[in-house]
Image (spheres, rainbow, N blue to C red):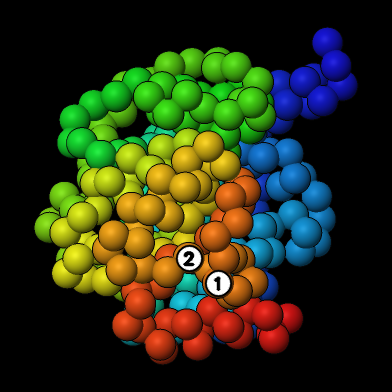
Amino acid sequence: MKFRAIVERLSRGRVFRRKVITRHGRVTIFVSPDAQLKYMRIGKNALDEDLVHIANCVVQGGDVVWDIGANVGVFSASCSARMNVSVLAIEADSWLSGLIRRTIALPEYTHRNFKILTAAVSNTDGASDFLIAKRGRASNALVSAGGRSQMGGAREVMLVPTLTIDTIAKSLGSPSFIKIDIEGAELAALQGAAKTLLNIRPILYVEIGAMVFHECVKLMSGFEYNCFDARGKETNDERKGNYFFIPNENSEARARISRLATTS
């Protein structure tokens, strides 16, 4: 057995506290190397600095943030550090959502508007098989999405509820910013968001696989959204990565993401 595989097995179920440093203060979260081995590191490089940077520069007071594929909640917790921001963390893996529940049970979260929904997001409401990755649980995926190579196979298959973005919005209100990182199910999630995209017009930040990039951009273009890269530059470059989708009419949102290139 390779050394990495041994470390991954030994890390299962282990949980640590970490401090996330944001522009609006420090927040405590519970993390596990069972989600990603990098959480064993010390320092800011262990904690998804790209997501913290977006929480600092793009999310603003008054926003309603949905974190779809929340993992251990780094982005959710970072957004919650800003005053007058509402956060909904959506995570299909009940073990990972349990970590987020431990986080928001801490006294520092008492007066924050931070909720958790344990469900997968797709293009239909129902129930689906969900793969728990042999490697980091951050690579978990719906069977229908196929998963990605970094899963290393599946250690378990869980049956999870699936909801569309439109269904969640009907029950829980209107998001202004949606982050989506759901390991191959991003196109299905966008397909289930038609009413939200037409009527609510949120900003989206989506991890997109290269195989579905063109379909995602075409779908979003049909709702009059433009695509920008993670540095805030308009793009149609068909590569796996993280992309913003901004409503064509929302110049204020374009100004927000332009800060990413000029702010460290």
- The residue labelled by disc 1 is 234
Percent from the top left, x then y, of residue 130? 40, 24
Viewed as shown, does residue 259 lie left or right of 173?
right
Percent from the top left, x then y, of residue 4? 82, 25
Residue most extreme to the top: 1
- Of the residues shown, which amino acid type is indicated by label 1? Glu
Q: Secondary structure at mark 2?
A: strand
Residue 154's tag is: none
Residue most extreme to the right: 3
Residue 20 vertical placement versus 263 (above, below): above
Question: Which residue lies at the image location 58% right of the left edge and 29% below the top edge?
Answer: 148
- The residue labelled by disc 2 is 227
Q: Secondary structure at mark 1?
A: loop
- Of the residues shown, which amino acid type is indicated by label 2? Cys
Look at the image and tell me whether residue 105 can be seen.
no
The number of numbered discs placed on residues in the rendered structure image is 2
Q: Nearer the viewer, residue 129 or 80?
A: 129
